[in-house]
Image (tube, grey):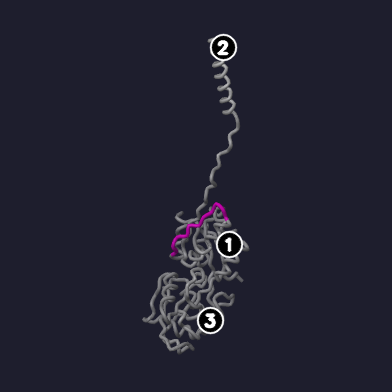
């Protein structure tokens, strides 16, 4: 009886070892791993960072595995410096790259043309359009009341950008020339501050990228120039706008370019006031 019990225990142990061995040899189910997320860090032009912030949810929804990290914008030059120094993946640009930037292996995708709009506070009524001469008279300080250009009896508060800004350069080149801004004008140093200030000042006028105004849903009006609005191809103050990146990083940035070029991307850009290049 004792020997029989020992044999039973022995065979039980052998079976257990065999089962364990077979289990260890059986194929294991693969452990699912999360797909790594590619984060594209963007900064530069305040206009284009504002636009990319508005486009971010649609891009990420359509492009799994990619995220946009849009940092506060300052200007195009800082964006270019950021990608050259490896601090950014994408430069938000309110202009095409300069020759010296192209020589440093920077590539550029043009999102479209952007109108630098003459914006006014909603209290400015009966002034849907101004001539170039009227705009020059306002920005030189010759005209100081809206009644002088067909509006109501209301003081004009003039806000301008600094001389190095693309909106000021465009305004000077296409409309006002080398006039001197009056001492009564207030200089604003960012796109967002310009929009916020004009929105909050009754009787105000300024200049800002229309795409950014639409992207932030700022409550201001765009005054046409000689009957032409800032989202029309014949508008006199149009600038190229897009994104810049190093050529060696093109594969990482390509999904963003693909989405911007897609039917959905192009529709989104049009909604935000971008004009297709001629």
What whole-number distance in Å separates the C-alpha atoms at marks 1 and 2?
Answer: 80 Å
Left/right placement of residue 30 relative to residue 145 reads: right
Q: What's the mark number on residue 260?
A: 1
Which residue in the protein does label 3 denote? 225
Residue at the spot x=56%, y=22% of the render?
16
Tell me which corner region of the image, top left, top right, bottom left or bottom right, holds residue 271: bottom right
Is residue 273 among the parts visible in the rendering?
yes
Q: Dots 2 and 3: beta carbons under 8 Å?
A: no
Q: Secondary structure at mark 1?
A: helix
Residue drawn at (50%, 55%) of the image: 40
Q: Assess whether mark 3 and mark 1 are in contact (beta carbons under 8 angstroms).
A: no
Residue at x 58% of width, y 22% of height: 18
State the CA–CA distance, disc 1 to disc 3. Answer: 29 Å
Mark 2–mark 3 Cα distance, whole angstroms, equals 107 Å
Query: Who is closer to the viewer here, 58 or 253?
Result: 58
Q: Tag 2: Cα neighbours inside 10 Å, few (<14), some, or many (≥20)?
A: few
Does 231 sit left or right of 87 as displayed?
Answer: right
């Amino acid at each position: 009886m004792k020997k029989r019990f020992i044999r039973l225990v022995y065979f039980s142990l052998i079976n257990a070892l065999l089962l364990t061995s077979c289990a260890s040899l059986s194929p294991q189910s693969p452990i699912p791993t999360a797909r790594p997320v590619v984060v594209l860090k963007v900064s530069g032009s305040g206009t284009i960072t504002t636009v990319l912030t508005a486009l971010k949810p649609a891009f990420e929804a359509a492009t799994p595995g990619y995220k946009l990290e849009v940092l506060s914008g300052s200007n195009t030059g800082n964006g270019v410096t950021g990608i050259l120094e490896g601090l950014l993946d994408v430069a938000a640009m309110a202009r095409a790259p300069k020759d010296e930037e192209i020589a440093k292996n920077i590539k550029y995708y043009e999102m479209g043309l952007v109108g630098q709009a003459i914006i006014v506070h909603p209290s400015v009524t009966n002034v849907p359009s101004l001539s170039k001469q009227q705009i020059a008279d306002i920005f030189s300080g010759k005209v100081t009341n809206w009644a002088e250009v067909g509006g109501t009896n209301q003081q004009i508060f003039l806000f301008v950008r600094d001389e190095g800004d693309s909106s000021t350069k465009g305004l000077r080149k296409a409309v006002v020339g080398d006039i001197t801004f009056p001492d009564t004008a207030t200089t604003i140093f960012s796109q967002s501050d310009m929009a916020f200030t004009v929105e909050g000042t009754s009787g105000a006028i300024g200049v800002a990228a229309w795409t950014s105004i639409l992207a932030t849903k700022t409550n201001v009006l765009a005054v046409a120039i000689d009957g032409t609005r800032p989202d029309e191809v014949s508008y006199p103050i149009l600038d190229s706008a897009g994104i810049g990146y190093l050529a060696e990083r093109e594969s990482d940035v390509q999904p963003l370019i693909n989405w911007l070029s897609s039917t959905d991307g192009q529709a989104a850009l049009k909604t935000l006031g971008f004009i297709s290049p001629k």
